Amino acid sequence: MTATPSEIIAQHRLVPVIALEQGDLAVPLAKALIAGGLPIAEITFRTAVAEQAIRSMVAQGGLCVGAGTVLSIDQVDQAREAGAKFIVSPGFNPAVVRHCLDLGLTVFPGTSTPSDLDMALDHGLTAVKFFPAEAMGGVAMLKAIAAPYRMMRFIPTGGIGPGNLNNYLSLPSVIACGGSWMVKPQLLVNGNFTAVEQLTREAVAMAQV
């Protein structure tokens, strides 16, 4: 049986959050992530080439590819058409969440308040993004907000790196963390995929401790 996006993410405990400015970087990036032991990619809709990048990575194979920074139903449809297996949004947009659920797409909407989590529960979700993690109070805030919602699991994202990754992953409510330190835009623009592979391998090792 094929693993679901949630299962793949929970297994690897990391989601690389990627903003690609050039579509032709998608395939070498996919190869670097796979070689580094992290077959997951969240391509954000912050750039014009997001849909093309998703399509290229899906065609490359071996990756669970999702779309991030999804703000509208139209973007959900674009991502799905390109082959995305999961959707991530910065906030909780009920229309976007409902559309994903209607399509059978895994969705991780952004949450940062108890009201957001109430809406997530009302939509039948069991895992959400916690964003922006550090700006919202970090580990202490996540502990506090998660306490009344013991059935909910979180993917904190925003301000997370090697220095605080394990502080988040040590929380029972956290299934994975989102981060971009292993896929920094400058590394991608410079074509330094050897560094991407190495940073990814180090991040994977750190996340499995």
Image (cartoon, rainbow, N blue to C red):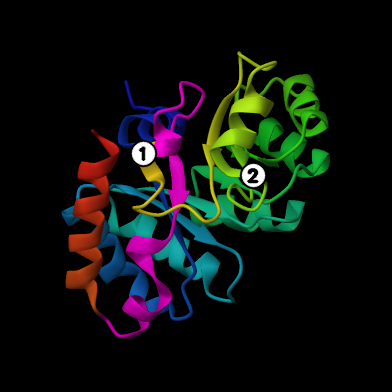
Mark 1 lies on residue = 166
Left or right side of 77 for 177? left
Residue type at mark 2 is Gly
Residue 194's spot in the image, x, y percent? 17, 71
Residue 40's spot in the image, x, y percent? 36, 48
Residue 128 in view in this figure: no
Q: How many marks?
A: 2
The Cα–Cα distance between marks 1 and 2, rounded to whole angstroms, is 16 Å
Residue 172's spot in the image, x, y percent? 46, 21
Mark 2 lies on residue = 137
Categorize mark 2 by other alpha carbons within 10 Å: few (<14), some (14-19), many (20+): few
Residue type at mark 1 is Asn
Residue 137 figure quarter: top right
Q: What's drawn in magenta, residue-wise?
A: 167-191
Residue 47 figure quarter: bottom right
Label 1 vs 2, first from the N-terminus? 2
Categorize mark 1 by other alpha carbons within 10 Å: few (<14), some (14-19), many (20+): some
Residue 116 figure quarter: top right
